Amino acid sequence: MQAAARITDPIEHTSALSGLLTGLLIGAAIAVAAIAIVGTGGLAAVAIVGAGAAMGAGVGEMVGSMSFAKSVSGAILQSGSSNTNINSLKAARAHVDVVECSKHPNPPKPIATGSSNVFINSMPAARVGDKTGCDAEISSGSQNVFIGGGTVQTDEISPEVPGWLHVAVFAVGMASAVVLAGPVIAFAGLVGGVLGGAGGNWLGGKLFGEGSDGQKASAFVGAMIGGIVGGKGGALLTAKSVPIPASTADLIAQRVSANALLRDSPQFAADMNKVGVTDEQIGTMFAKEAPLGFESPEQFGQFKTDLHGALNEAGLPDAEIGLKGTSTTFYSENPGKPLGHHWDADPLNPGDYDLNISSPKMVEQLQDANISPSEKYGVFKTRDINENFPALDKFQQEWSQKLGRDVNFVGYPETPLRDPTEYILRTPE
């Protein structure tokens, strides 16, 4: 229940609009200063200023909407009930009684909301917290008379921050994000921000109360966190969809095409007979259900399950694993290798499995142990990975024995480009 409102009771506005405009100017100024320091120019410079302005506007509006930023801007001054007094003052009602507001002087604005089930002269009774047509709130009322019920709106409320201004700030911020980060990351950040803001708003309402400063801050923080997480997700998606450089992609396509022709040749059949590869294995390989060297897709599934467990045990939930090459696709699709180089051309020394692993946590742990990538190949050696991650060493030994060929981890400082022939065994959790 809220205190009953009467003639002469004050109304107050937040500083959301002035906070937005001030934040916009400060954000833009900071961005301009940053550009001057780093020397960025062109469209990127414009986008940086736009992003700074939009961010500053959001922060400024949030701060300006807090209770400590409110100030009295007028009072309920006209009409009031002709036959109902509260503490010797005429009771205020929605729709028929008006306020005088210094920020919106003409014409006087009506009280726009009131109680949904308490009426005075057939009009909703006004209370502390009810809104006026200019988006102010009645800020104080009776000390000993309180009115309950829900809230009903009787008149249009012009928002303190105009809708067109919100749209303009959003458009500038979104356009800047597209220029600076690309459309995928910008859209993912937007979705994450909306979801995070909704979650923060709900949580803040539960913890601090509806309309409280805590709820506003929670919504803002939730939107920020959601935007960052969404942006990172968009970046990951973008990284995985980065095309292979045209020259490499063309060579791989040529090799795939040549291997497809070779599959129907006498040489292909001779190689299969030489090492006992079955038609079923070839079929599952071309369907990418299992690489060659595995007895069945079920065994390959167990391999991936055990790999997942080993990575978690090793403390590498962020690891991405890929497997490719002659050991998985029969004929090499590496343009640098001879056409027809069979994965088991030498039965006494069968081709191995290289598990290409990229993981920031792995890199951090190896660097802490003063281990650097190989100068020649730019990757972390299998030996170093096994010595620092016993769970991976155990996995390697067990599956090397099961498959009759070496299973080796090759560590990449950064996620390598993926080509169409590769098996992606695991993506980060």
Image (spheres, rainbow, N blue to C red):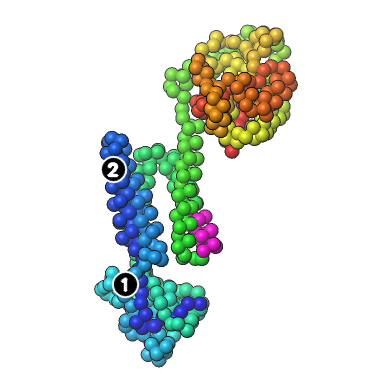
Q: Is residue 155 visible?
A: no
Q: Is 379 placed left or right of 99 in the picture?
A: right
Tell me which secondary structure the magenta stretch mostly adopts.
helix
**Kind of residue indicated by mark 1:** Ser
Quadrant in the picture for the C terminus: top right
Which residue is at the far left?
106
Residue 298 vs 63, above or below: the answer is above
- Magenta span includes 204: yes
**Region in magenta:** 197-208
Given residues 30 and 325, the one toward you in this image is: 30
**Residue 100's x, y, as percent?**
30, 76
Q: Quadrant of residue 350?
A: top right
In the picture, the disc for residue 73 is 1
In the rendered structure, which disc, 2 or 1, sits on the residue that comes first in sequence? 2
Can you tell which of label 2 and label 1 is closer to the viewer? 2
Vertical side of 187 occupied by 287: above or below = above
Residue at x 46% of width, y 24% of height: 244
| 216 sits to left or right of 337 | left
210 lies above or below 74: above
Q: Secondary structure at mark 2?
A: helix
Identified at 39% across, 83% down, the residue is 6
Image height check: is 217 above or below 328?
Answer: below
| Residue 251 at x, y percent in the picture | 48, 16
Disc on res. 33: 2
Taking depth in this image into account, of 54 and 123 the one nearest to the observer is 54
340 displayed left or right of 156: right
The three-letter amino acid code for the residue at tag 2 is Ala
Magenta span contains residue 249: no
Residue 55 visible, this angle: yes
